[in-house]
Amino acid sequence: MIFWFSGTGNSRWVAEQLARQLNDRLISIADAISAAEYRYTIAADERLGFVFPIHSWGPAPIVLRFIKQMHIDGYSTSTYTWMACTCGDECGHAVALWQKALGRIKGNAAFSVQMPNTYICLPGFDVDAPDVVTRKLAAAEPRVEHIALSIAQRRCTIDVVEGPKATLKSRVVYPLFKHYGHSDRAFKVNTAVCTRCGTCVKACPVGNVAIDESGTPRWHHRCELCLACIHACPQRAIERGTATVKKGRYHLPNKYKQ
Ligand SMILES: Cc1cc2nc3c(=O)[nH]c(=O)nc-3n(C[C@H](O)[C@H](O)[C@H](O)COP(=O)(O)O)c2cc1C
């Protein structure tokens, strides 16, 4: 059983690869929350996995909110429980934050996969150059195979890139990000170039974007700041304040989408 969340598709691809290689079932955290479905049953020999992006040196907050509410019938201390996060570079102390949210469920293994960066909201942060995107995606394929093998063998391991100053980033910056960083009030649409195509509506994993009666996309204050809407817009009509104006946009290549 693999619970997954993804904004721009990186974590979705990792979750799908792992599910295929491990012959596990996939459960979308966004769909589960929207259906208020928090109770699941796990078989005695089944593994429990989580795949998600790193947001500000911690798990994307929606993942922790889901984990804190979920109930797994049939869980026992012999249930092998793992996480795989995707990040542009490093994940800080995300593993400890995941374990804390799990409560009585004991995490056995954690892995990180470096994928193309999607964070563009602050000065100094931008998408990766095309050659870096190509290199990261090429390295991700054998990395995911390695992770699948480790999970299949039920290895107990912490195999993540924490990066420097992890305590400061995960214990100070991450809580601030969770508290103040999620507002969608700064999203704006350049109506002169927006074609009302609805790509932003489809891209949002949590159903936060809708086209209003005048044909303009509107954000409804349930944003996870995954930035899927900004990156997906084919017209580059969406910005978040001014910080994203001169930044690149990320599109996971089609061959990584099902
Ligand atoms: C709000 C936000 C914060 C992010 N913070 C980090 C971070 O702290 N460290 C990092 O290496 N990458 C960070 N990233 C990059 C993503 O973790 C990375 O691109 C991830 O693969 C995106 O996954 P997704 O396509 O499944 O949404 C951040 C991205 C976003 C949107």
Image (cartoon, rainbow, N blue to C red):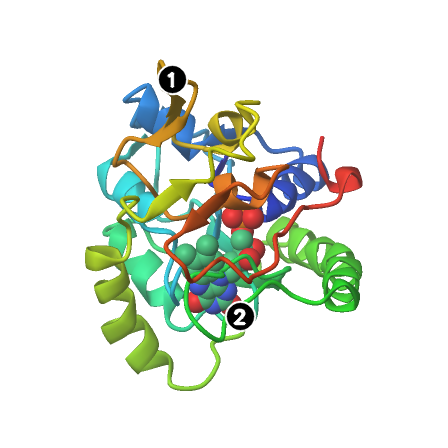
Q: What is the crowding at mark 1: few (fewer than 14 residues within 10 Å), some, or many (at least 20)?
A: few
Quadrant in which the C terminus appears: top right
Kindly give the residue lying farthest to the front in the view shown. Answer: 192
Mark closer to the observer (2, 1):
1
Residue tagged 1:
214
The secondary structure type at the circle numbered 2 is loop
Q: Residue drawn 46% across and 29% down?
A: 43
Residues at marks 2 and 1, CA–CA distance in whole angstroms: 47 Å
Q: Is residue 110 visible?
A: no
Q: What is the crowding at mark 2: few (fewer than 14 residues within 10 Å), some, or many (at least 20)?
A: many
User: Mark 1: which amino acid?
Assistant: Ser
Kindly give the residue lying farthest to the top in the view shown. Answer: 213
Kindly give the residue lying farthest to the left in the view shown. Answer: 179
User: Mark 2: which amino acid?
Assistant: Val
Q: Is residue 250 above or below residue 207?
A: below
| Image quadrant assignment for residue 54 | bottom left
Front-most of residues 61 and 226: 226
**Mark nearer the N terminus (2 vs 1):** 2
Front-most of residues 25 and 181: 181
CB of mark 1 near ligand 1 (< 8 Å): no
Q: Residue drawn 31% across and 50% down?
A: 61
Residue tagged 2:
160
Q: Where does residue 198 sit, x and y in percent of width and height?
A: 53, 23
